[in-house]
Image (cartoon, rainbow, N blue to C red):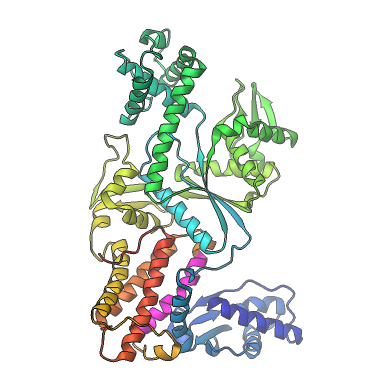
Amino acid sequence: MKHHLHDLLDHALKTIENSGQLAVTERPSYQLDRSRQKGHGDFACNIAMMLAATAKRPPREIAQLIVDALPVSGSVDKVEIAGPGFINFYLTPQAYLSIVSTILRQGDNYGCNNIGAGKKVLLEYVSANPTGPLHVGHGRGAAYGDALARVLKAAGYEVDREYYVNDAGRQMDIIATSVWLRYLDLCGESVKYPANAYQGDYIWDIAATVHREKRGRLFHGVEEVFMGLSSNDPETYLDGIIARSKQLLGDSGYGMIFDLATDTLLENIRQDLKGFGVEYDRWFSERSLTTNGAVDKAIALLKEKGHLYEKDGAWWFNTTAFGDEKDRVVVRDNGNTTYFASDIAYHLEKFERGYDQLIDIWGADHHGYVARVKAAIQAMGQNDDALDVLLVQFAVLYRGKEKVPMSTRSGEFVTLRELRKEVGNDAARFFYVSRKCEQHMDFDLELAKSQSNDNPVYYVQYAHARIMSVYRQMRDKKLGPKIDASVAALKVLTESHEQDLLTLLSRFPEVVEQAAINHEPHQIAYYLRDLANGFHTYYNAHQFIVKDKAIRNARLALIASVKQVISTGLNLIGVSAPDSM
């Protein structure tokens, strides 16, 4: 409906411009919003006031010109000018009644649009280092990223979903070394395990696999590992153990442990995400950026453009010239490239793949990283506005009013797998998506499991199940359901609850569009709660299976459209629509 009114306004503007009644040098952006008060119509537009400055005419005078030039529409009952120049549209009852047949005809496609047609988007999310199981913080990023991908696809964008595998660098070396030290433990050696190495039972599990498959072949006495190393500085001490492990094991032995640890943990992540309903089009390896020369290419490009300088044996990128707080090292004095160098190469590679927009979903602790990545994009001659970085806040778990300690036997955090096991995928995903990603989130485990109206996912799913129960009752009574969704058949829907539902149903396409434009899938969750509330209120106030056949069939058509929109909306955020509960 909103797009229809936009078309009417555009037609009116062209008419008065072509007739010479109004000279518009530049057409302004204007707002066309649903009226907050029913007395002001269904939609209100401020276009006349936006044109007044350039046209140098009173806004009410411009508004009258526009209203007089509006083409006749069967969906518009009347148009009024209000206040300083607002144009208020009053829709016909038929305009709302026709929504039901539109929904039932379009099915899962109702709410879809083509605002993103022809635009390619690369959406990268989660991208947790393969150094342990996914925790509840990763779960929020996973649910948000997957829901955003679904919403963007519904808006016509061509979306590719990508997981960036951080399978290079010091953290991965710490993982490999941690596994080897646990392997030595299993070989009977007394190892003083560093406190800053990776903890958790999963390290023992990988070490046990090494012990079963390579028993004796990778054994080294513990004295060879720690000989001559000082433990005064924990980080330097750990780096020394890493270097010693590489030396003692050689490329093949160390590589075997490194690959086994990486592959095991990455497969664990894949399975967790798949079980959560999150899948990717591509898993991109950070190591590939080095082996295929992408990092060297990006560094050479920055040098060529004069954005790198040498200092103290290292190569620095002058990111301060692009708004960053300080310059950043891309090549250390030992010749090794930094994580930042890999990220620069990765984003250049993304642009070279031909994407119109890049969306990166990061944890909130990466806030300071945004400026330097955008600086790199500018420096390489790309459009940094094409990159949108969305920051996801951590989720704090509560059981009622009691905060859940973030420590379990599987690691130093509550894992996503544990959360899914306790509350289920649907509750986890709905709760994760129900707030803006940048807002802090308190996740109440008891609420998520409750079967009450206070639990939003239960409340929405129960609305769908209730409608399905009505259909079952109809079949049991051998009354159908046979649905006639014509405007003529629906004219008997005159109750206030029915009118409210029709208005809510008409809003769904606008909600999907705004969720896509603003990258805010939480708008879908909010809308579903409103729609479920509208249905439950209607259900509690009226009977559907009544003797009057006309009223019965009209109400069945209405709730069928409600069921369809709930199902579509839940699917957009990756939540199921159960037939019974």
Question: At 61% across and 42% down in the image, what residue appears?
Answer: 347
Number of callouts in the render? 0
Is 68 magenta? The answer is no
Q: Which residue occupies the foreground of this view, 198 or 436?
A: 198
Residue visible at 37% across and 49% down?
276
- Using the image, determine if residue 198 lies above or below residue 471: above
Tell me: 266 left or right of 292.
Answer: left
- The spot of residue 295 in percent (x, y) is 63, 33
Q: Which quarter of the rendering shows the C terminus?
A: bottom left
Which quadrant would residue 539 be assigned to in this image?
A: bottom left
Residue 372 sits in quarter: top right
Q: Answer left or right for 162 relative to 462.
A: right
Identify the residue at image location x=23%, y=52%. Answer: 401
Tell me where residue 447 appears, x and y as whole percent: 25, 57
Q: Is residue 75 left or right of residue 143?
A: right
Nearer to me, 61 or 529 = 529
Q: Is residue 173 above or below residue 541?
A: above
**Residue 8 placement: quadrant:** bottom right
Res 543 seen here:
yes
Q: Residue furthest front?
A: 478
Asked if 565 appears above or below 315 in the picture, the reply is below
Counting from the top left corner in percent of width and height, residue 480 is at 31, 82
* Res. 438 in view: no
Please indicate whether residue 494 sits to the left or right of residue 258 in the image: left
Main SS category, magenta section: helix
The x and y percentages for residue 351 are 65, 46
- Residue 501 is covered by the magenta coloring: yes
Please report the bounds of the magenta region as a residue range: 496-514
